[in-house]
Amino acid sequence: MEITVQKYGGSSVASSEKILRIAEKIAGKVKAGGKVILVVSAMGKSTDNLIRLAREVASTPDPRELDMLLTTGEQVSASLVAMALQSKGIKSKSLNGFQAGIKTTARYNEAKIVSFDKKKIIDMMQELDALVVTGFQGITEEGEVTTLGRGGSDTSAVALAAALGVDCEIYSDVAGIYTVDPRLHPNAKKIKYISYDEMLEMASLGAKVLHSRSVEIAKKFGIKIYCGSTFSDEEGSFVADENIIIEQPVVTGCSLMENQTQVFIKHLPVDYSLVRRIFEKVATEGLNVDMISIINSESDLVVSFTIVESKKKHLQAALSKVLSDLKDWNVEYHTGYVKVSIVGIGMRSGIGVASSFFKALQNVPIKLVTTSEIAISCLIAEQYKNSAVEALVKEFNL
Amino acid sequence: MEITVQKYGGSSVASSEKILRIAEKIAGKVKAGGKVILVVSAMGKSTDNLIRLAREVASTPDPRELDMLLTTGEQVSASLVAMALQSKGIKSKSLNGFQAGIKTTARYNEAKIVSFDKKKIIDMMQELDALVVTGFQGITEEGEVTTLGRGGSDTSAVALAAALGVDCEIYSDVAGIYTVDPRLHPNAKKIKYISYDEMLEMASLGAKVLHSRSVEIAKKFGIKIYCGSTFSDEEGSFVADENIIIEQPVVTGCSLMENQTQVFIKHLPVDYSLVRRIFEKVATEGLNVDMISIINSESDLVVSFTIVESKKKHLQAALSKVLSDLKDWNVEYHTGYVKVSIVGIGMRSGIGVASSFFKALQNVPIKLVTTSEIAISCLIAEQYKNSAVEALVKEFNL
């Protein structure tokens, strides 16, 4: 039994007409002898609409109830897709999170998948041509409904593919993974193959093609991910093990994170246990910080990092708690930055990438630089965003 | 622990503003020391919208998938109501069908409740001020999602109240039960007390205030039902055991069923096993037939009954199957009828009700009459609808 796992994003199932087109596509595959498990997101903007409703009845909706609310979106699209498949003569059923036995951790709004009811799914695939599973959701051991966070349907699909030991196809309205976001640079090239590590850097650095966690799972289980367009035959991109990728440029892509704020916590005593407590607090609050630097003189410490602008208030509250015993400390926020990065596993062996990077950006004032084994990032003022991306695209032929 | 079970219909939770008003009302009750279990329907027209979507992707949507789709509606309203309650400082949680352990039979679209997870609900009520449970839905022993049919949330609420041994309050935009549908007769009187049997006749005869099955359950377990208006303090109506009802008019109400078709199956051989097979088939197809009459001569049989007009096609298909071995039979459909009924337990002992009924309708051509112990019904042409209702209202002082 040859099973393919395919994931369809919200824009792909945004209307009954689009759902019928997907059913048509699957019908072709089934007639050719294939069997498909479809993992679906909520229709179009339905998740946003549900969040809006939640905010109308509660200023900070309870995370548990929010998950109860949001999981309905995928159940709607899954049942409609199953009906559409049936109307094309395909034996199909839908399963929601609890029926598919998608067990997760108990962290509402950002749960992690622990396991699937693999046996049930395989048994059902003996009878069916196509099974439709709700993405984004699961249940805890106690039967509480959870969601996996924004983009979580990618993770549902890859985790399911991993459980079944098959590859995973992710379909959306973007026809693959590009060297640069095509909205920033319309001539961006499509990447044919990208390694897990590069994709992880790209995802964490702001490329919104795939949910980071889905790439982590794919890497762990050696699952190949294909990212393609739902409604066109244009060839997409593969995320795979670097060893199977033959042609490997030094720099694979360029990514951008917008709305960055640089935070400076000043006048701290020279006490590194305090630094640990700050970052512990920040982590337990679920605040993502980046580009950390610590400057110490004999008399005091300055802790600096970046954060997305929208989290400033949340951060301020967290810092006020952890530093409540101290006086004299203060925080400065410098807003209006973007973080531009280049990514490529070729950097591991490639020489001179950093110098090319700085050469390309010679006319851009750089506030901060961080590097990883396969990426170089810099923080620059928003106004230099386009010229920096253009210069990097040109320098590295992206 | 004093628990009240309250059910809120779709129009009562149609917007976030209305949901907040319900939360406000519950907050008052909780402050006074009460605990409430709320059973909620889907918001406003959301069930209709989901059905429309289903019809767009499949001409006859699969019953299983339809239930998967429709149950999302109550999960949306339940989670929003729980959030709204929390925003008013009330300890609250929502449960969907599977979490509340609402076990049902396996008949999709019209399942019957078998049991609740009473222990879980009582345990949760130790901690909470208000529990919100999705109406209309349940799950089978195998974990398949089911619905109870139109109006099923009434049944969910009454069954839950019965399981807990408490009374049940049903809130909607109608302030109680009327002697006649106020849309037909604006001066209709509100009924203060109505017996289970009368309410069952009224419900099955077309009064849309309560789902019949909810009244059956209330009768079986001796649960008193209060029907009132969600957003006004106007006093509503009680459905209760006839023994506690002191003041008892002979005729309690008048009801109307529209879009009736009279069916005549003609030229059947004189074979009563055939009649049995016809009605067996009709029952297994879930077709409701009414006002049955059988006319036999020496040479043939005519079987006649009424059915709602929209089921004609379905009936024709069912008859074609069961009568496939016969020739010469044919079916006539006479459309454009309504069924008008009067109901009252006082009829059991009251004398002369039938004669008053026919006297009132002396100017209306009557096609068919049926009676039960506590009701008299007649089939008349649509054009006489209003004059018949007016005459009955006047005759029986409704």
Image (cartoon, coloured by chain):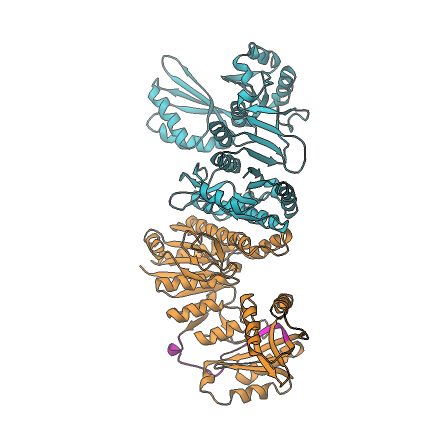
Chain colours: A cyan, B orange
Using the image, determine if residue A296 lies above or below residue B24: above
- Residue A146 visible: no
* Residue A240 on the magenta span: no
- Residue B57 visible: yes
Q: Residue at x 62, y 65 (%)?
A: B314
Task: Report the front residue among A60 and A268.
Answer: A60
Image spot of residue A365 (x, y percent): 57, 16
Using the image, determine if residue A226 lies above or below residue B174: above
Report the label total.
Answer: 0
Image spot of residue A131 (x, y percent): 54, 45
Residue B243 shown left or right of residue B78 in the figure: left
Task: Report the front residue among A116 and A286.
Answer: A116
Q: Residue at x 59, y 22 (%)?
A: A254
Residue B302 shown left or right of residue A221 in the figure: right
Q: Quadrant of the N terminus of chain B?
A: bottom left
Q: Residue at x 39, y 75 (%)?
A: B241
Task: Tell me where the magenta segment starts and ends, as one range.
Answer: B241-263
Looking at the rendering, which quadrant does residue A41 occupy?
A: top right
Task: Report the front residue among B9 and B320.
Answer: B320
Using the image, determine if residue A326 lies above or below residue B72: above
Task: Report the front residue among A316 and A117.
Answer: A117
Image spot of residue B103 (x, y percent): 42, 57
Using the image, determine if residue B115 lies above or below residue A136: below
